[in-house]
Image (tube, grey):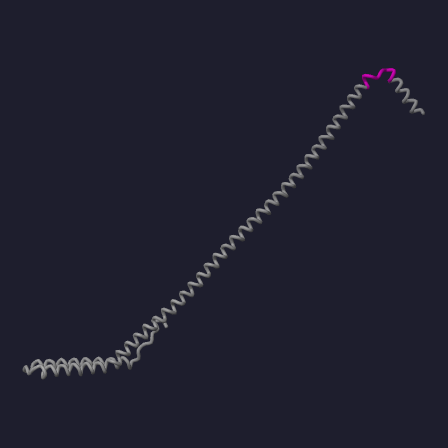
Amino acid sequence: MNQLFKKKPDCRGKRYLAVTILIAVFMLFYAGMAFGSSEGAKSKGWVETDTFRVMNFAVLAAALFIVLRKPVAQALNGRIKDIQDQLDDLESKKKEAEKKLAEYNEKIARLDQEAEKIVTQYVKQGEDAKERILKEAEAAAEKLEEQARRTIENEFKNAKNKLQAEILEKALEKAEELVKSKITSDDQDRLVDEYLDKVVA
C-alpha cells in the first residue's frame, strides 16, 4: 500500500499514550520532591539516605517500564509495520518498474525489427523500381530503334526510287539525243512510210 494511504492510529491509542506520559511526568516530579527532601535532611549515613533514593528510582523505573512497555511496544510495532509496508510498497514498485522496463526493452527490440523490416522493404521496392525502369527504358530504346530502322528504310527506298526516276529520265534524254543524232532524213521517210502502211493495213 502506498505510504500516502497509511492507516491512521486510533484515538484510543492516543489517549492511552497521553495518560502514560502524564503518569511518567508525575512520577518524575514526585521523585524530584523526594530527592530534595532527602537532601534537606541531616546526614544520617548511606543506608538511610541512599536507600530511599534507590527505592524511589527502582519504583519509578518499574512503573515506567510497566506503564510505557505497551505503548512503546505498540509504537515500535507500528513503526516496524510502517517500515515493512514501505518496503513491501517499494518492492512492488520495483517489480512493476522491472516489468515496465522489460516491456520497454521488448518494444525497443520490436522497433529495431520493424525498422529493419521497413528498410528491407524499401530496398526491395527500390530494386523493383530500378528493374522496372530498366525494362521500360530497354523497351523504349527498342521501340526507338525500330522506328529509326523503319524511317531509314523508307528514306532509303524513297531515295532509291527518286534515283531510279532520275536515272530513267536521264537515260531517256540520252536515248532521245542519241536517236536524234543517228537518224537521217531517209530513215525518217522510211519510218513514216512504215507507219502509214501499218495504219492502212
State left or right for residue 91 relative to residue 176.
left
Q: Is residue 147 above or below residue 186?
A: below
| Residue at the extreme top of the image, as rendered | 185
Q: In terms of image quadrants, where is residue 51?
A: bottom left
Q: Position of residue 18 (x, y in %)?
A: 24, 80
Q: Is residue 2 above or below residue 190?
A: below
Q: Position of residue 5 (x, y in %)?
A: 35, 73
Tally of numbered discs = 0
- Position of the N terminus, as image quadrant, is bottom left
Q: In terms of image quadrants, where is residue 30?
A: bottom left
State left or right for residue 89 relative to residue 148.
left
| Residue at the extreme right of the image, as rendered | 201
The magenta segment is 179-187
Residue at 46 percent of width and 60 percent of height: 107
Residue 30 appears anywhere in the view: no
Q: Is residue 132 above or below residue 53?
A: above
Majority SS type along the magenta span = helix
Question: In the image shown, does 69 or 190 lie closer to the viewer?
Answer: 69
| Residue 180 magenta | yes
- Position of the C terminus, as image quadrant, is top right
Question: In the image shown, does 33 or 11 lie closer to the viewer?
Answer: 33
Residue at 30 percent of width and 76 percent of height: 78
Residue at 46 percent of width and 61 percent of height: 106
Residue at 89 percent of width and 18 percent of height: 190
Residue 65 appears anywhere in the view: yes
| Residue 68 magenta | no
Question: In the image shown, does 137 or 85 lie closer to the viewer?
Answer: 85
State left or right for residue 87 relative to residue 107.
left
Q: Position of residue 3 (x, y in %)?
A: 34, 71
Q: Position of residue 193 (x, y in %)?
A: 91, 20
